Amino acid sequence: MTDVTEAAGTTTGATADTTTGKATGGRAAQLQHTGLRHGWTTGACATAATTAAYTALLAGEFPDPVTITLPKGQTPAFALAAEELREGGDGRSAMAGIVKDAGDDPDVTHGALIRATVRILPPGSGVVFRAGPGVGTVTRPGLPLDVGEPAINPVPRQMIRDHVAAVAARHGGTGDVEVEVSVDHGAEIARSTWNPRLGILGGISILGTTGIVVPYSCSAWIDSIRRGVDVARAAGRRHVAGCTGSTSEKVAVAVHGLPEDALLDMGDFAGAVLKYIRRHPVDRLTVAGGFAKLSKLAAGHLDLHSGRSQVNKEFLAELARRGGAGEELAAAVASANTGLETLRLCEAAGVPLGDLVAVAAREEALAVLRGAPVAVDVICIDRAGTIVGRAGPAGPGGAHDRG
């Protein structure tokens, strides 16, 4: 399972099953059913690096490889890519580094060097987390961490605490330590993630709920959508936009004047946006996207990826009939080569297929929202960013219209 911000550049697809075998030296295990290797989250790598560094502080030697236990019981082992025991004015510290192996997932953090520097603190201090270079800091509310905290998510924090306690028990420590996590080139990597939009500045997030990265999982994108809704609500935004891409996002901003933290990176995951907003409502949702993608939503598809849903031209032909198209035009729409061609055929004949698709997409969205107090409007665009169809706000708080 890839995790939010780690996989901003991830290609999504069918979720794969994982094995539970041990992987030595950071080499990810083989996925039995897909032929793809799974990998390890930044949280798992940070936990392993912390375990090695704290062991070296107490025992004088770095374990290499270092073995950790993941939340579901897997016990991968990681080779150390960097290690250093330091004596300085602020006392002894130890640093260990592990290169992240994302397996066969196209994860932007694949190959990143995750470092943990551990320093002994006075008894009673507990485990204190610090963001080193390349790890972000939370600057906006709405995330599962307080503003000002290092972007080390709750599950990795607990994994690190558990392993610190285990090392302390084995080697006679107190478990009171400062753990500074850093990522080489993390600030540059973060530019390819959604962290800046979510208000996580200065680097990437240390993430993971299982410790395992499943190749081509959609979980990262969906989790980012959820965090985007949370951040927008925490900022008091009552109108948000779910957009299929950067062009539709620009159009939504131009039409509605929405600020950046009201924009959701919906991508192909319309269902994820609608289902989360159903449980965490806002006053208004704008759905904006390309005509072809939104025609899929109009036809009942909640995943708009080309590998998992197709433009239904028979459905578009039926919409065209409702808009006044004769049988000759409807037949031409049904046999058209692309969704864009169906739109052009209808435009030439004066049939408002773009508006009809927008209305149908809005009604499908409202059906998924199941009466949640959210008004929905839809904007369809072509590849140039020209608006080719609109459906005005409808649902609780919005009057039905096609404007």
Image (cartoon, rainbow, N blue to C red):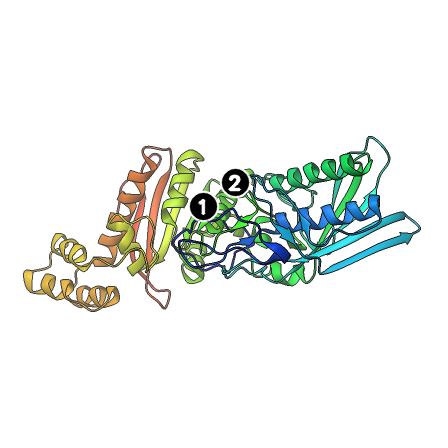
> Which element type, helix, strand or loop, lies under badge 2?
helix
On screen, residue 130 versus residue 85, left or right, reads left
Give the label, 1 or 2, closer to the camera: 2
Residue 346 vs 258, above or below: the answer is: below
Secondary structure state at the residue bearing disc 1: strand
Coordinates of residue 287 in the picture (x, y in percent): 37, 50
Number of residues whose C-alpha sits closer than 10 Å to that of mark 1, classed few (under 14), some (14–19) or many (20 or more):
many
Residue 131 placement (x, y as % from top left)? 72, 49
Looking at the rendered structure, the kind of residue marked 1 is Val
In-image side of 12 versus 7 (left or right): left
Quarter of the figure with residue 324? bottom left
Judge whether residue 335 can be spotted in this image: yes
Q: Quick one: 286 or 73, which is closer to the camera?
A: 73
Q: In the displayed image of the protein, which residue is found farthest to the left?
A: 327
Rounded to the nearest angstrom, the CA distance separating label 1 from label 2 is 11 Å
Pick the front one: 13 or 45: 45
From the top left corner, tell me how far across and down residue 263 is, in percent.
Answer: 48, 50
Earlier sequence position, callout 1 versus callout 2: 2
Q: Is residue 317 left or right of residue 32?
A: left
User: Please, what is the three-letter code of the amino acid marked with disc 2?
Assistant: Asp
Q: Nearer the viewer, residue 20 or 99?
A: 20
Residue under circle 2? 230
Residue at coordinates 60% horizontally, 40% vertically from top-left? 155
Residue 74 shows which numbered tag?
none
Residue linked to disc 1: 240
| Between 246 and 133, the one nearer to me in the picture | 133
Q: Residue at x 54, y 43 (%)?
A: 210
Is 368 on the left or on the right of 139, as rendered? left
Q: Residue 113: x percent and y percent? A: 67, 60
